[in-house]
Amino acid sequence: MNKPLVPGYERDRMCAVQDLKILDTAIEERFDKITREAALRFAVPISTITIIDKDREWYKSMQGLKQREGPRDISFCAHALLHEEMFIIEDTLKDPLFADNPMVIGEPFIRFYAGRSLHDAKTNLPVGVFCIKDIKPRVMSMADISAFLEMAIKAEDEINRRQ
């Protein structure tokens, strides 16, 4: 398993995360509305708005997961954070980066992942990721990608409303 890289701008990125004052805050309907909509629209069991902290991924909103956070070193979102464009893994078992990931070979048995990094408006640094996950492989249509990106923009706007 390949661990996600830590970007060279990590110190500045973590300052941006801290400045948002979003980590470990209460559940908020404005975020849950977006992840619920994504889970329904794409018929997936998991959708999250994830903030990438130093050693963990923390879910500001989540559908389909029991834990509110997970380790950064096995995080799909920590990989997606480093991509400017949408990050899609159509079949995790066929992808050498993820085939032996504990979340693929064990619960929640992720087979599909799509995520887009969310940026801090002040610094334009990535602070988190909006994503959907499925337990079966899939291919997204152009209409799906367009709808997904619109939801990601909503999530990014909500994260920045706190500033």
Image (spheres, grey):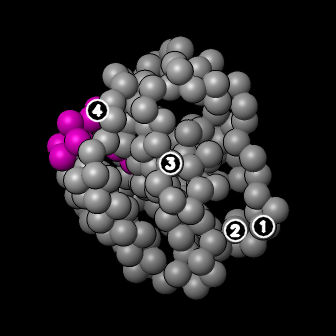
Alpha carbon separation for disc pair 4 and 2? 30 Å
- 131 and 48: which is toward the camera: 131
Tell me the tag on residue 121: none
> Three-letter amino acid code at disc 4?
Pro
Amino acid, disc 3: Phe
- The image's mark for residue 9 is 1
Find disc 4 in the rendering and name its residue. Answer: 45
Which image quadrant is residue 127 in? bottom right
Do tag 3 and tag 1 residues touch (Cβ < 8 Å)?
no
What percent of the width, then of the height, locates residue 81?
59, 55
Q: x, y percentage for residue 133?
A: 38, 36
Ranked by sequence position, the earlier of labels 3 and 1 is: 1
The secondary element bearing badge 4 is classed as loop
Residue matched to label 3: 87
Q: Which range is magenta? A: 39-48
Q: In this image, 158 relative to 121: left or right? A: left
SS category of the residue bearing label 3: strand
Q: Which residue is mark 2?
A: 13
Q: Nearer the viewer, mark 1 or mark 2?
A: 1
Q: Does the CB distance between marks 3 and 4 fall below 8 Å?
A: no
Identify residue type, mark 1. Tyr
How crowded pointer 1 is (Cα within 10 Å; few <14, some 14-19, many 20+) is rated as: few
The answer to whether 129 is drawn above or below residue 62 in the figure is below
Q: Report how far apart the C-alphas of labels 4 and 1 lie in the structure.
A: 33 Å
Query: Looking at numbered disc 2 in the image, what kind of residue is underneath it?
Result: Arg
Residue depth check, mark 3 versus mark 1: number of the one nearer the observer: 3
Nearer to me, 40 or 160 = 40
Check whether the beta carbons of the residues at disc 1 and disc 2 lie within 8 A of each other: yes
Residue appearing at x 64%, y 24% in the figure? 96
**Quarter of the view holding residue 63:** top left
